Image: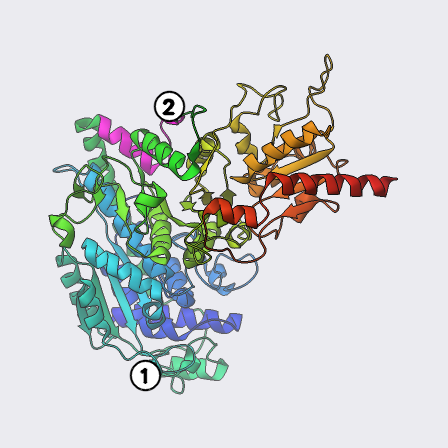
Amino acid sequence: MTLDELCVNTIRLLSVDAVQKANSGHPGMPLGAAPMAYTLWMRRLKHNPSDPQWFDRDRFVLSAGHGSMLLYSLLHLTGYDLSMDELKRFRQWGSRTPGHPERCRTPGVEVTTGPLGQGFGNGVGMAMAEAHLGARYNRPGFAVVDHYTYGIVSDGDLMEGVSSETASLAGHLGLGKLIYLYDDNRISLSAATGLTFTEDRAARFRAYGWHTVVVDDGNDVEAVDAALTEAQGEKDRPSLIAVRTHLGYGSPHKQDTFEAHGSPLGADEVRLTKANLGWPLEPDFLVPPAALAHFRSSQGRGRAAQSAWTANLKAYMETYPGLAAEFKQVIAGQLPADWEAAVPRFPVEGEGMATRMASGRVIGALAAKLTNLVGGSADLDPSTFTGIAGAGDFEDRAGPGADLQGSLGGGWSYAGRNVHFGVREHGMGSILNGMAAHGGLIPFGATFLVFSDYMRPPIRLAALMGLGVIFVFTHDSIALGEDGPTHQAVEQLANLRAIPGLVVVRPCDANEVAVAWKVAVETRDRPVALVLTRQSVPVLERAESATDGLSVAGGLAPAEGLRRGAYVLAGVPSGGPGGSPFSQPDVILVASGSEVQLALEARSCLSDRGVRASVVSMPSWELFDEQPPEYQECVLPSDVLARVVVEAGTAQGWHRYAGPKGEVISVERFGASAPGKVVMREYGFTTEHVVDSALRVIRSCRNELA
């Protein structure tokens, strides 16, 4: 057995032993894909196991995350901080070796994978981030950003639609430093792929604009290495290397069957597989010393590569001090000291402003200070107002779009900050996650709120990974109008709020939008969704300062209250000297977004009737729920049971804020095609309806007390 064969079988059988011990997992892929993974990791991958976060490392994505033991075996063997004990605790409570790879749980895992196709898209985002940062910061003789993005993708990954979306864009963009090894084992979870997946995959990717190579024997390490050499030589196209492998390789009874995909081989079959591969039957979790020594040589190579980069970075700092200072700041995830000063304040004017338009102005102002703010939309920039004027388009200068003019000024190249995702919402979400996971960028992406359904998987994964992606959703309700129910969001806010770890913010006016963007930029450890109107809403006239961040007697509270998720926008002045400036209201009107203005109008009408109403702007449940109980009690006093919540979406989730006696004015059916104001009126979003609801809950509460 050669050293290469010894190392490959070490990977294979460590993986098999871990799956068998857990009595759970996927042994088939590690058995079949180990040779190509070994070749990539030991001959091509630039990484330093001693410093998994070294910025100029190559990125590796195991898109077929069900084969996680393949990755865990490689991480342990090459010297990452992942002990043998952790391999033996595969899929167990509290281990660093969960069933599918999880970012931030296991050193060396770049992204959380498992939902097929997502890792494929993440890798495209990483390659885009590398291309952009290299174009911005590299200078002759100083390639401070110069690495590849590699991945192992499966039949299932290629079947998922998100891989088609992202592969199409990657080919268009000519991402030459993106290289995927395709584990072409032709077996899926339930059957051979001949039942469902018979297209010519290589031809499909060539049509996308990819370079393709076919390796007929997945056990031929030299052939895989030659294919990687060829792919690295292809500078202007991403590469797909289709490697013909055998699921469950070496298993006498389960090789090339779906039975090897998602279940342990079984004790007897494990012994037969070891014997078939010439491996000792005992002990389990065997790592031959010669194999370990070879794997651990990765540490020395990694340290040397990082040392060379560090020396080059030092010389770069001396030659380009200003650019180098900016580079170090962005890769450290730090913000410029004065960035908030760029955020505009909006005056009260005319008929107001759509919050999507206010967002566009904030983006433009922020982009001047935050040079790593990069993003775009799913072909909707004119509607979402997410284009950055003068920042150029992210395009391949030599590619199909090279004859185009920059749509927003500033030309086109990988240094451009406007990303045109095309009509690919799902792909956009997974690419944004890859950009954020890569580091160095503050990525954002936009579409209409109703189409958040198309990208829910990557939004969920952004939250699971704790990635600082900014999702911008415009056209946020039935007030959209004539486009009708297919485009009018109803249940989407509830869908987004149901995702743990996602901060959803629906600002009520331009100045709340400005604060919402501040929150989004500052929040680097979880995603933020900004939900914005198509229609104009008034810019509220606010006081300059607040009492305890709640409200101001004689004026509306400052928009900074958004930071706390909810705040008393308009209280009930006490009129008395000293003490609290507010009296207890008869009813609390709670609203978000465009419905806040409706609540304010209802408050005025109630006042004319001698009813004291306060208005609470609640743009973010998540931020409010994080506040101390004392603050929450000040905003929503527990002894005020008369409450009315107003939001143009489903009521799901709002009842905990409305309380047991409150009402929710909501939308519990799909929308309709008509002018937006007409739709809102017909669905009960009128001052009169809010007033009637308020009077009704007040009577109900008083009758009960009586």
Residue 361 lies, in percent from the top left, at 35, 32
Q: In the image, what residue occupies the spot 65% across and 47% down?
A: 664
- The answer to which quarter of the image holds residue 240 is bottom left
Q: Nearer the viewer, residue 333 or 506?
A: 506
Q: Nearer the viewer, residue 144 or 488?
A: 488
Q: Amino acid at mark 2?
A: Asp
Secondary structure category for the residue under label 1: helix
Is the residue 519 above or below the residue 453 in the image?
above
Q: Main secondary structure of the magenta part?
A: helix
Secondary structure category for the residue under label 2: loop
Q: Amino acid at mark 1?
A: Gly
Residue 623 lies, in percent from the top left, at 56, 39
Decide if residue 701 is on the left or right side of residue 312.
right
The segment highlighted magenta reads 322-343
Q: In the image, what residue occupies the spot 49% across and 59% down?
A: 86
- The residue identified by callout 2 is 338
Q: Residues within 10 Å of mark 2 (few under 14, many from 20)?
A: few
- The answer to which quarter of the image holds residue 348 is top left
Q: Which residue ends up furthest to the right in the rendered image? A: 706
Report if the CB atoms under discs 1 and 2 are less than 8 Å apart.
Answer: no
Residue 201 lies, in percent from the top left, at 24, 73
Q: Pick whichever of labels 1 and 2 is earlier in the sequence.
A: 1
Q: Nearer the viewer, residue 502 or 242?
A: 502
Could one spot residue 375 in this view of the protein? yes
- The residue identified by callout 1 is 194
Decide if residue 223 is on the left or right side of residue 536.
left
Look at the image and tell me in which quarter the N terminus lies: bottom left
For marks 1 and 2, give the CA distance. Answer: 59 Å
Magenta stretch contains residue 215:
no
Residue 588 lies, in percent from the top left, at 68, 35
